[in-house]
Image (spheres, rainbow, N blue to C red):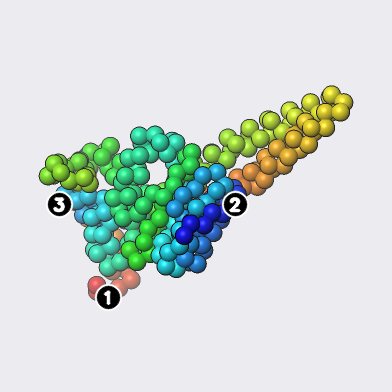
């Protein structure tokens, strides 16, 4: 555990998932929209702020791709992966409890 | 063909709405500087406009970094004015919102509120001191009039700060149960 970790926001969770492979800002926006079948549209300003915070926390780092690439790519770090794992088990617990109590609904 | 319209907005959200209405009519903003709006003729509703306040002046390196990032996502910065930035994006490229979650919306509203609070304090200071001078010195009608106008502006700005407070409060309540 990198640090005591609360629930991630939907935006941060999807950004981290996207960065399992190197990607630039616009790529992340498109990927998140694809992953959620168009349900989640990341605002560019929100994404910019989130990238800044994730860089500060060391959950992602700039990824140096081809030198002629104008757009900056980012990629998840081992710490970031751990955060995703922790979040996955938290989400698993939510799902499990939700299904058990609401009952019978399978997704 | 270029169209130039002179208009003054205090409220950036009303201004943004107006720019989008103009765009719907086929007039797309290409430049702005102090109450002067320049439009070009385009297909109707070709662009969606968004206005935003920056932490620094638009010429500051941090702001430039931000503008570069937003432009790399397919939007275009058409104008900057002090700390304000005017973005547009082709409507065919899908919805265009700069902020997609409540916490970043609140952060932006707070910045706008701080911006207007600074101006309001200045207006009241200048306005009230002029009224004071106008009352103390007989025949200083100019100071009285000037002071009243500036104070009235301060009152107008105060109303806007109150409406921003309401928006922030509503979002804060919403944030307790949902994040976007």
Q: For the residue labelled by badge 2, is the local secondary structure a helix, a strand or a loop?
A: loop
Picture disc at residue A104: 1
Name the residue beneath numbered marker 3: A21
Crowd band around label 1 with a 10 angstrom C-alpha radius: few (<14), some (14–19), many (20+): few
Crowd band around label 2 with a 10 angstrom C-alpha radius: few (<14), some (14–19), many (20+): few
Q: Nearer the viewer, residue B134 or A38?
A: B134
Q: Is residue B146 left or right of residue A13?
A: right
Q: Is residue B50 left or right of residue A64?
A: right
Look at 47% across and 40% down and name the residue there: B83
Q: Same chain for labels 2 and 1? Say yes or no.
A: no
Is tag 3's residue or tag 1's residue first in the polypeptide sequence? 3
Q: Judge depth for marks 3 and 2 and give the one in front.
A: 2
Q: So how many labels did they put on this image?
A: 3
Picture disc at residue B7: 2
Q: Judge depth for marks 2 and 1 and give the one in front.
A: 2
Q: For the residue labelled by badge 1, is the local secondary structure a helix, a strand or a loop?
A: loop
Is residue A58 visible in this depiction of the protein?
yes
**Quarter placement of the C terminus of chain B:** bottom left
Picture disc at residue B108: none
Q: Nearer the viewer, residue A40 or B31?
A: B31
Look at 49% across and 48% down and name the residue there: B32
Instruction: Provide the chain ID for the residue under circle 2.
Output: B
Look at 26% across and 54% down and name the residue there: A26
Q: Position of residue A11 (x, y in %)?
A: 31, 54
Q: Nearer the viewer, residue A43 or B179?
A: A43
Q: Quadrant of residue B50?
A: bottom left
Q: Position of residue A21 (x, y in %)?
A: 15, 51
Q: CA distance from mark 3 to mark 2?
A: 48 Å
């Amino acid at each position: 555990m990198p640090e005591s970790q609360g629930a991630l926001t939907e935006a941060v969770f999807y950004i981290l998932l996207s960065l399992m492979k190197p990607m630039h800002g616009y790529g992340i926006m498109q990927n998140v929209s694809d992953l959620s079948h168009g349900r989640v549209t990341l605002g560019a300003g929100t994404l910019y702020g989130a990238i800044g915070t994730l860089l500060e926390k060391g959950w992602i780092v700039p990824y140096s791709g081809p030198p002629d690439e104008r757009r900056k790519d980012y990629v998840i770090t081992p710490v970031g992966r751990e955060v995703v794992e922790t979040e996955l088990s938290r989400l698993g617990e939510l799902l499990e409890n939700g299904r058990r109590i609401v009952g019978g609904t399978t997704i | 063909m270029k169209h130039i319209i002179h208009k003054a907005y205090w409220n950036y959200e009303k201004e943004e709405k107006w720019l989008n209405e103009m765009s719907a009519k086929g007039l797309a903003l290409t430049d702005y500087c102090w109450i002067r709006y320049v439009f070009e003729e385009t297909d109707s509703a070709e662009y969606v406009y968004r206005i935003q306040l920056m932490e620094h002046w638009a010429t500051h390196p941090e702001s430039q970094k931000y503008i570069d990032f937003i432009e790399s996502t397919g939007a275009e910065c058409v104008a900057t004015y002090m700390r304000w930035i005017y973005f547009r994006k082709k409507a065919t490229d899908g919805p265009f919102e700069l902020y997609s979650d409540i916490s970043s919306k609140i952060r932006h509203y707070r910045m706008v509120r701080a911006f207007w609070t600074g101006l309001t304090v200045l207006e009241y200071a200048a306005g009230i001191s002029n009224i004071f001078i106008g009352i103390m010195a007989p025949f200083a009608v100019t100071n009285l009039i000037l002071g009243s106008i500036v104070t009235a502006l301060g009152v107008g700005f105060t109303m806007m700060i109150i409406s921003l407070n309401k928006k922030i409060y509503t979002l804060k309540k919403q944030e307790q149960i949902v994040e976007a």
